[in-house]
Image (spheres, rainbow, N blue to C red):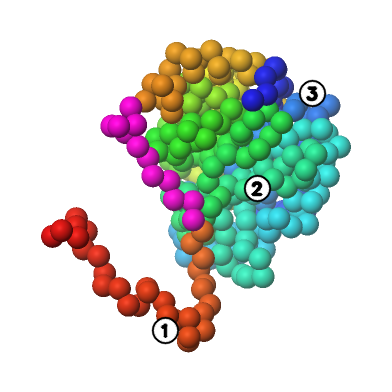
Amino acid sequence: MPDGTVRGAAVQAAPVFLDKAATLEKAVALIEEAGRGGAEIVGFPEGFIPAHPIWFHFHSGTDRAGTRFSTELFKNSIEVPGPEIQVLSEAAARAGTYVVMGVCEKRPDTFGSMYNTQVFISPTHGYVGKHQKIVPTVGERLVHAPGGPETFGVFDSPFGPVSGLMCGENSNPLAIFALTSDATRIHVMAWPNHFPKPALPMHEISLIAARSFAQMSKAWVISASSVVDDRIREMLPLRDEDREFLLRDDIGGGSCIVAPNTTVVAGPVIGNQELILYADMDLDAGITMKLRHDLAGHYNRPDMFRLLVNRAPAPLLLEATSEQLDRSSIYQQPMPVLGSTEEE
């Protein structure tokens, strides 16, 4: 397991809302800036390319404006892997930094189905893998499908296992335990531009989640939040109260970096300012804390508590010949009864 100090970075920025090409260009510039700042791993907000579907906080799912925004989201979403991921990989290589990027992903050669996705990119190996949000939250459910089980877990990096979760799933205790069992060493949280009214400000909830994740996993946590900019304020509001809400400076931001002992070593940066937050992360700090309290090791009781994680893909379409179907036990076995045993 690697040791030493790793310089981490959290990008707090708004996308060029619903403009894939312009946001990709902005993402490349931010990756290169993070590289100049010495970052070895940098995390981006949720759905950064090209946007997060925050219009559902102001428009209904089927009105004219909401439908138009959702259509533009699909038209500006990207395939993973795909040409945009190649551009990001080249930027990561130039910057010499590992990148965890939030994107809206579309299924290849289809139209209409999307996922809320974090992409993991190595400066030396390019595209490493992706995590699709397990369960879309609130308005996301109108445009995003649930993530594939095969995309859940940790990813290789020069610093050991790296993981990521988005927004509300960073509070999922079973997901946290599974990633802790996978020995995640650096975890990247991704957050949207703001929460729906009348939720607590995003910076309060994201900080609670970051410190809680660090406490349970003993990993370093890089938490990257998006913000609201003038383009969003111009495009989204439906009513005067919406405009007033989007003008508030306490609804966005909150990016921070948290140590395995739950100390906040950088941030939180509250408000709609765009910046890159840096911290030097001592990997030995995680060892020190796990020696005291390893919830996936000596501080657990597997005879009492176990977690089953299914990472098997669940394809939408399976093709089979009639001969294969005739031989398939799926159609020949009786359905099991929950709670029954063979002896019964």
Per the rendering, the mark at residue 326 is 1
Q: Residue furthest right?
A: 94
- Tell me if label 2 and label 3 are in contact, CB under 8 Å: no
Pointers 1 and 2 in contact (C-beta within 8 Å): no
In the image, taking residue 148 as reference, residue 157 lies left or right, namely right
Q: Residue at x 52, y 84 (%)?
A: 321
Q: Position of residue 256 (x, y in %)?
A: 59, 24
Mark found first going from the N terminus, 3 or 1: 3
Is disc 1 surrounded by few (<14), some (14 to 19) or many (20+) residues within 10 Å? few
Left or right, residue 4 beside residue 286: right
The span shown in magenta is: 301-312
Is the residue marked by circle 3 packed among few (<14), some (14-19), or many (20+) residues within 10 Å? some
Of mark 2 and mark 3, the one earlier in the sequence is: 3
| Marking on residue 129 | 2
Earlier in the chain: of badge 1 and badge 2, it is 2
> Residue placed at 54% from the left, 30% from the top?
183
Indicate the amino acid at tag 3. Answer: Gly
Look at the image and say whether residue 302 sits in the magenta stretch.
yes
Which amino acid does the dot numbered 1 rest on? Asp
Quarter in which the C terminus is drawn: bottom left
Q: Say which quarter of the image contains residue 74.
A: bottom right
Kind of element beneath mark 2 = strand
**Residue at figure coordinates x 69%, y 34% from the top left:** 157
Numbered mark located on residue 38 in the image: 3
Q: Seen in the image, is 60 located left or right of residue 243?
A: left
Query: Chief secondary structure of the magenta span?
Result: loop
Please tell me whether mark 1 or mark 2 is closer to you in this view: 1
